[in-house]
Image (cartoon, rainbow, N blue to C red):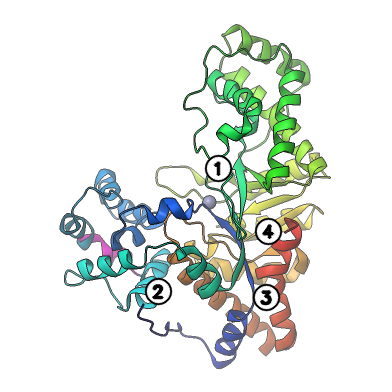
Amino acid sequence: MARRAAKYSTMDELAVALSDQLGALPVVDAHEHLHAEAKRVARRVDVFLLFYQYLAAQYICAGMPPERAQALEREDVPLDEKWSILAPYLDLVRDNAVARPPFEALRHYLGEDDLTADNFERLTERMRAHNQPGLFERCLREDCGIVAVLNQNRTMWQTDLFHPILFESRFIGGPDRVGFQTVMDEAADPDRWALCEDAREGVDEALLLPATLGGFVETMEALLERRRQEGMIGVKSIGFAHVPVEQTQALAAYQHLRAGHADGDDLAALAAYLRDRMWEACGRLGLVAVIHTGVWAGNYADPTTIRPTNVLPMALAHRNTRFDLFHAGTPSPADAGMVARATHNVWLNLCWSHLISPLLYGQALDLWLDFVPASRVIGFGGDYWWNVENVYGALLQAREAMAQVLARRVRAGSFTEARAVQLAQRWLHDNPRDLYSL
Ligand SMILES: [Zn+2]
C-alpha cells in the first residue's frame, strides 16, 4: 500500500505539535455502523464507494438526481458510468468537510491525491487488492490506534474490537403490529435473530401477543438482559420530543393493538410508554441510552424535530439511566452543553459532528470546556457503514480541530500542553471507555 504524509490544514506550530501528540493516544471510536468485515471483504468494492454515504447527500443537495446518486453505490453499475455521474458534482462538494476523509483515504491507502477520469480504474484495482480479511484491524487498530468501536449495524456482530448497540425497535417493537410480534419472536429465539439486520423478515404474522401490556414489558426486559449478557452495550433511539403517557392510555392502546384496530394515536402512546420502560430498564441493567440528535444524515428531513434539548426531559425522568447525546446536537452545541450541565446523567458525544463541520466541532469543545465537566465529553466517532478506510481521515479531521482548540487555550494561558493532552486522552478514550464500561 502506498503511503503519503497527510497534509495539515493551516495550523500553527503548537497545534501541529499537539495534533501529533494526540495521534499517539489510544482511541475509542464512539460510533460506527460498520457491517461485519466478512460482508465488507465479500463486496466487489470500487473507489466510488469511498465517495458515497454522507457525500451522496451533498451531491443531491448540489442537484444530482437521487437515483443517480444511489447508482454510485451499486455493484452492477460500470465504473465509467459512475465517473460520468460523479464528475460534474465532485468539484461542487470537494471542499465540504465530509469530503476530506475519502480524499485522505486516497492519499493514505491508494497513493494518489485526487479522483480523476484517468485514475478511477487504477484506484479501484488498488482498493480491491486491499479488500481482504484483516482490513478492519489494519485500518482501525494499526492506522488509527482505535482500541474499541461502539458499533450499530443492526446486528449483534462483535469482535475483540467491536461492541454492539441495537436500535430501540428491537425491544419496543412498532411501528405496526408486525413490529411487536417481531419482538416476541426474537425473545423466544434470540440466537436466530442475533445476526439478522431486519428481524421483521420471516416473522410469523399469526403470532399472538401477550395478553397484557405487562407481559410484553417483561418480555422486552428479558430480551434487553439477554442481549446485555451477550455483549450489547447500549440501545439507540432518535431524539424526537418525548411525551410521557399515562399507563391507562397505554393499556387501552395495547388492547386495541391485540384486537387488530390500533390507530396512530394508540401506536404513538405505546411507543412512548415502552420507551420509558426501556430506558428505566437500561438504567437497572447498566446499558447506555443512545439518542441521535441535531441533524439527519440524509436529505429532505427536518432537523428541528430532533433538537438536543429534547434529551433533557428524558434524562430528568430517568435519573439512574446514562444518556449519550449523539452528534453534539449539531448545529446547536451550546444547547447540548446546557442539557449536560443541567443533569448528572447526560454525556456529549461528538461522533460524526467533525464530518459535518470541524468548525462547529471546535466550537462545541471550546464551549464545553467553559461549563461541562471534562468527564462528560466524547471526542470521536466515524459513523460509516462500509467505508472503513474513511475512518482514518475522519479521525485526522477531529484530532486537528481538537488540537487547534487546545492550542488556543494553552496560548491563552488557560492550561499547560500536558493538561491539553490529558483532556484529549479523556475525550478520545477514557470517557467512552468508562461510560460504556469497556
Ligand atoms: Zn450513526
Q: Which residue is mark 4?
A: 348
Q: Earlier in the sequence, mark 1 or mark 2?
A: 2
Q: Nearer the viewer, mark 1 or mark 2?
A: 1
Kind of residue at badge 2: Glu
At label 1, counting other C-alpha atoms closer than 10 Å, the crowd grade (few under 14, some 14-19, many 20 or more) is: many
Q: Residue at x 64, y 15 (%)?
A: 209
Is the CB of mark 2 within 8 Å of ligand 1? Answer: no
Residue type pointed to by label 4? Leu
Q: Secondary structure at mark 3?
A: helix
Q: Position of residue 246 (x, y in %)?
A: 76, 22
Q: CA distance from mark 2 to mark 4?
A: 27 Å
Q: Which residue is mark 3?
A: 424
In this rendering, which labeled residue sits more in front, label 2 or label 4?
A: 2
Disc 2 target residue:
104
Q: Quadrant of residue 96?
A: bottom left
Amino acid at the residue labelled 1:
Thr
**Residue identified by numbered label 1:** 155
Looking at the image, residue 128 sits to the left or right of residue 322; the answer is: left
Say what secondary structure mark 1 lies in. loop
In the image: residue 208, left or right of residue 96:
right
Q: Earlier in the sequence, mark 3 or mark 1?
A: 1
**Residue 287: x, y in percent?**
74, 46
Disc 2 and disc 3: Cα gap in Å?
22 Å
Position of 100 relative to 313 (above/below)? below
